[in-house]
């Protein structure tokens, strides 16, 4: 059942708690090609940032004890980035990442999966797979 709402939702931006924000931000920027669009520092140290790549955005935050244990963080969540998988894959390889070949799903989408150092699953996918 589809209902209309006046809320005007425009985007969803996942917030991911990470064990080492500097390392994670560097990975997302240097390897995956994101850019830091906004950041917040505490005592001169990066504590939160919003990263953007094209129209996609994520937020990373330094995990603290109150955020719970790192084990299982991100379980049950896959971040899916709709893109041209072949172009993204070539860019990842050019940035020095070793990736296997993408897969074509039974429903015809081409997907390239990665897992970051905090265990978050990233899926770069194209709706019209070129076989």
Image (cartoon, rainbow, N blue to C red):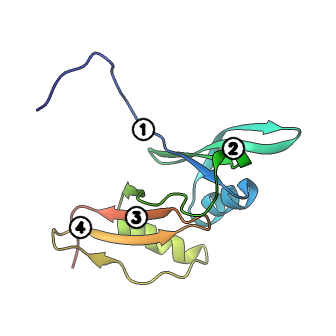
Label 2 or label 1, whichever lies nearer to me, is: 2
Residue 92, numbered circle: none
**Near-viewer residue (29 or 48):** 48
User: What residue is pinned by disc 3?
Assistant: 123
- Look at the picture and state if 46 lies above or below 115: above
- Callouts 3 and 1 close, C-beta under 8 Å: no
Classify mark 2: helix, strand or loop.
helix
For the residue pair 106 and 38, the one nearer the viewer reads as 106
Identify residue for label 4: 109
- Residue 47 location, x and y as percent? 75, 43
Of callouts 3 and 1, the N-terminal one: 1
Question: Residue 118's image quarter?
Answer: bottom right
Q: Are marks 1 and 4 in contact (CB under 8 Å)?
A: no
Viewer-nearest of discs 4 and 2: 2
- 48 vs 38, nearest the viewer: 48
Q: CA distance from mark 2 to mark 1?
A: 24 Å
**Mark 2–mark 1 CB contact (< 8 Å):** no
Across and down, in percent, residue 110 comes to 28, 70
Q: Is tag 1's residue or tag 4's residue first in the polypeptide sequence? A: 1
Mark 3 secondary-structure assignment: strand
Whether residue 64 appears in this view of the structure is no
Can you identify the residue that label 1 sits on? 12
Please name the residue that numbered disc 2 is placed on: 66
Which residue shows up at 61% across the image and 78% down it?
96
**Circle 1 SS class:** loop
- Foreground pick, 31 / 22: 22
What crowding class fits label 2: few (fewer than 14 Cα within 10 Å), some (14-19), or many (20 or more)?
A: few
């Amino acid at each position: 059942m589809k209902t209309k709402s006046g809320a005007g939702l425009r985007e969803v931006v996942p917030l991911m708690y990470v064990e080492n924000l500097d390392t994670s931000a560097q990975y997302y920027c240097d390897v995956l090609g994101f850019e830091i669009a906004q950041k917040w520092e505490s005592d001169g140290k990066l504590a939160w940032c919003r990263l953007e790549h094209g129209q996609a955005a994520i937020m990373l935050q330094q995990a603290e004890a109150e955020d719970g244990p790192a084990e299982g963080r991100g379980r049950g969540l896959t971040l899916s980035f709709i893109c041209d998988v072949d172009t993204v894959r070539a860019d990842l390889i050019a940035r020095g990442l070793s990736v296997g070949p993408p897969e074509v799903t039974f429903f015809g989408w081409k997907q390239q999966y990665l897992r970051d150092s905090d265990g978050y699953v990233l899926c770069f996918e194209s709706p019209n797979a070129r076989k």
